[in-house]
Amino acid sequence: MFPDSVITGSTQLITVAPADAGATVFSAQGKKNKLVAASIVSGTILLSAPGSSTTITVDQFTITGPVDSRLDNTGFASFSVGARATINPTTEDGNYSGTNAFRLVYN
């Protein structure tokens, strides 16, 4: 989740790192020490708000830890995802949302 922002008259780049409190966390469970590969399906998405004609671009998705890793010895893994939002000075007020997919391949 990106923090609330105030439009300042110039383009703002807001980054939420995977270690930040606002990062999205995904958990996986399976057989212990099983190989998994994590990825984000789309490199760029557009957020939109009801009643708004403007969008916010979200890109530079990052995942904590190695994207090719193993479930731990209890069969558990956790991945945090961060990204960057570009807010233009013409962006209208609103609650923006969008969708992307986190892919975890369990081998």
Image (cartoon, rainbow, N blue to C red):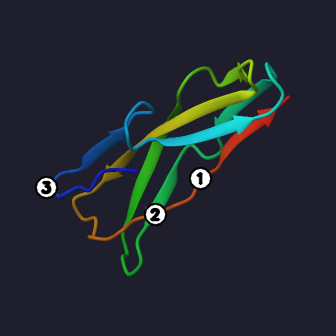
Helix, strand or loop status at disc 2: loop
The amino acid on which the numbered mark 2 sits, given as a three-letter code, is Ser
Q: Which mark is residue 8?
A: 3
> Residue reaching furthest left?
8
- Please name the residue shown 58% across and 33% down the image: 79
* Side of 40 relative to 28 (left or right): left
Callout 1 secondary element: loop
Disc 2: which residue: 97
* Left or right: 81, with 13 as reference point: right
Which mark lies nearer to you, 1 or 3? 1
The residues tagged by marks 2 and 3 sit, at their Cα atoms, a distance apart of: 21 Å
Kindly identify which residue carries mark 1: 100
Using the rendered view, name the quadrant where residue 75 is placed. top right
| Quarter residue 83 falls in | top left
State how far apart marks 2 and 1 are (Cα).
10 Å
Q: Which of the image's four quarters has the C terminus?
A: top right
Q: Earlier in the sequence, mark 1 or mark 3?
A: 3
